[in-house]
Image: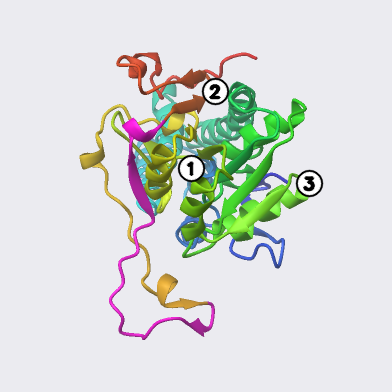
Amino acid sequence: MRTIEWNNGTIALIDQTLLPAEYKIIGCETVSSLCEAIVSLRIRGAPALGAAGGYGVALAAHTGAHTTAATTPAMFKQFMHDLCAASETIKQTRPTAINLAWGVDRVMGAILESGTSRIDEAKRIALCEAVAIAEEDVQRNRRLGRNGAALFEDGDTVLTHCNAGRLACVDVGTAIGVIRAAVEAGKEISVVSCETRPLNQGSRITVWELMQDRIPVTLITDSAAGSMMREGKIDRVIVGADRITRDAVFNKIGTYTHSVLAKEHDIPFYVAAPISTFDPARLERDVVIEERDPDELRRIGDVILAPAGAVVYNPAFDATPIANVTAVITEDGVMYPAQPDWWRHVRDPSNTAVPKS
């Protein structure tokens, strides 16, 4: 199945915390269960969170207290009040990843722009818009992949960090989607995947995905990347993004380090992300970096790695200066931040139209 989809009144998703040991589909029947899935990273990745946000609003609309077919002005007002409250709760689960709020706001916007005053119609609109977000994500990623594939050469060895594959999206993937597209174009590409501590999305998910696709992949510790670059074993680096401001790319912690190493060794550093990940209203200083549970570093499962009282700093993301980025690959094309007017080519993320192939 896809990473996330609507299934008879529930949100079905792949529980990514269990991979690679177990492939399991879980169902979120309430907004609180969806929020738990987002916080615990059962569902993760910027584009997938965009779909989760959209589906979350639809779920809130369909599972609230307003089940009667009749609608009075007072009932509709209360329905919208409850829907707005649920939407804010969903958005606060992952504050750094902009796609989550984008998906929520897009579905809420569709309801408001319709001018409806009927609960049943609002429910219909919410679900239709959420499904559209998911379908468009697949189209965007396919186009993004084709745009980025041209940047890779036959025989390249590519480093990637965290997971920007189909499990970070509804399907296909962003950074890994580009690699898939290059392979589909007949290029021999091998991948080096950083483990991505502390939750090991690189080893657990990226390596699993690539092995499923029979794309050659080598797993390394995060700290081995610089040595491999110095030894000439890495030709390019490609990562995804959770938010892109005019001056920085926010992605999984460790991305900035890889960008500095790539710049030092004159290796192209690419970011692959849909336009919905762009945040034209903010700069790096305006973005709050999510900090996660200290026990993610203190232990792995039941295995204790550090004393219980150890002071921990555990940011989920870091900011990579846009000057460290060679190119940003989107569904609209490839953009080069070294060009002074590069941002001029970025369309408004609120324009949801998907460019035709």
Q: Whole-Å distance between the Cαs marked 1 and 3?
A: 25 Å
Please report the residue visible at 45 percent of the width from the left and 59 percent of the height from the top.
Answer: 39
Q: Say which residue label 3 marks.
A: 214
First-in-chain label (2 vs 1):
1
Q: What residue type is disc 3 on?
A: Arg
Q: Say which residue label 1 marks.
A: 46
Q: Quadrant of the C terminus?
A: top right
Query: Which range of residues does the magenta coloring cover?
Result: 301-325
Say whether marks 2 and 3 touch (CB < 8 Å). Answer: no
Q: What residue type is disc 1 on?
A: Ala
- Figure label count: 3
The disc placed on residue 238 is: none
The disc placed on residue 331 is: 2
Q: Whole-Å distance between the Cαs marked 2 and 3?
A: 25 Å
- Indicate yes or no whether the magenta region holds residue 247: no
Q: Residues within 10 Å of mark 2 (few under 14, many from 20)?
A: many
Q: Residues within 10 Å of mark 3 (few under 14, many from 20)?
A: few
Q: What residue type is disc 2 on?
A: Glu
Name the one closer to the observer, 209 or 51.
209
Q: Quick check: 209 left or right of 120?
A: right
Q: Secondary structure at mark 3?
A: loop
